[in-house]
Amino acid sequence: MTNLSRIKVVVLGTNGVGKSAVTVRYLTKRYIGEYSSGKDMTYQHKVTFDSVVTEIEILDTSMCSGCFNEHLKWGDAFVVVYSVEDKASFQGARRTLQNLSQAKESSFFSLLLLGNKRDLDYMRRVEVDDGQELSLKYGCQFYEVSAAENSAGVSLAFMSLLREARSAQLLR
Ligand code: GDP
Ligand code: MG
């Protein structure tokens, strides 16, 4: 067993759901409101689990319809983001989970379903129960968060995904 592990995380979801906002929130604890779109961004940072340093690479994807297979091959863990005020984005998340589960043996990657923009509760179009039910269907973790409002939920969600991915690596 090495004392340095590496986890590659891909952030997926339809345009405008807050993929960049949650990624930047997790990495910097900040929310800047506007994020450049149009190209994939990769970030690196380190997390220590049980005194073992783990290198994390996060790929914040943008609209690229032909890239799914590439992302799939690259990633160990996937964050599938939708917005609670956008029903179509939830349907998109459902399709992505379906595609992921068909394409890869689920034992080889960890999955997080993330309902973002929970601060927009008054505009909510996707119920918490719907997210919960979808996550149960695909055996993935599920959190509702607001990248705009605070860091706690986003950090918790990412950390539990990373912890799961790390445990899965140790079992291999
Ligand atoms: P991406 O296309 O999925 O990367 O989405 P962005 O991260 O660029 O976010 C799209 C828009 O939604 C931006 O105007 C963000 O400021 C906004 N946004 C992102 N997260 C939240 C959130 O939690 N709450 C609210 N109200 N707006 C958000
Ligand atoms: Mg983006």
Image (cartoon, rainbow, N blue to C red):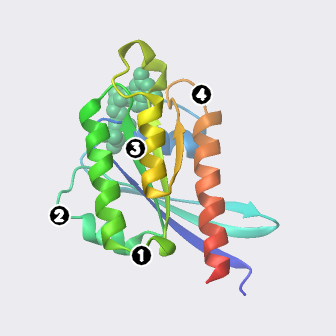
Instruction: Answer with mark 2 or mark 4, whichever residue precedes in sequence.
Output: 2
Q: For the residues marked 4 and 3, what is the alpha-carbon distance in whole angstroms?
A: 17 Å
Label 3 belongs to which residue?
81
The mark closer to the camera, 2 or 3, is: 3
Residue 130: x and y in percent read 41, 35
Earlier-in-chain disc, 2 versus 3: 2
SS category of the residue bearing label 2? loop
Circle 3: residue type = Val
Say which residue label 2 marks. 66
Front tag of 4 and 3: 3
Q: Is residue 151 visible?
A: yes
Total marks shown come to 4
Mark sitting on residue 105 = 1
Q: Looking at the picture, which amino acid does disc 1 mark?
A: Glu
Front residue of this view, candidates 39 and 91: 91
Indicate if the residue with disc 3 has its beta carbon within 8 Å of ligand 1: yes
How many neighbours does mark 2 have within 10 angstroms: few (below 14), some (14-19), or many (20 or more)?
few
Is disc 2 in contact with disc 4, using a CB cutoff of under 8 Å? no
Residue under the image location 48 percent in, 40 percent down = 132
Q: Identify the image quadrant of residue 102.
A: bottom left
Residue at the spot of label 4: 150
The mark that comes first in sequence, 2 or 1, is 2
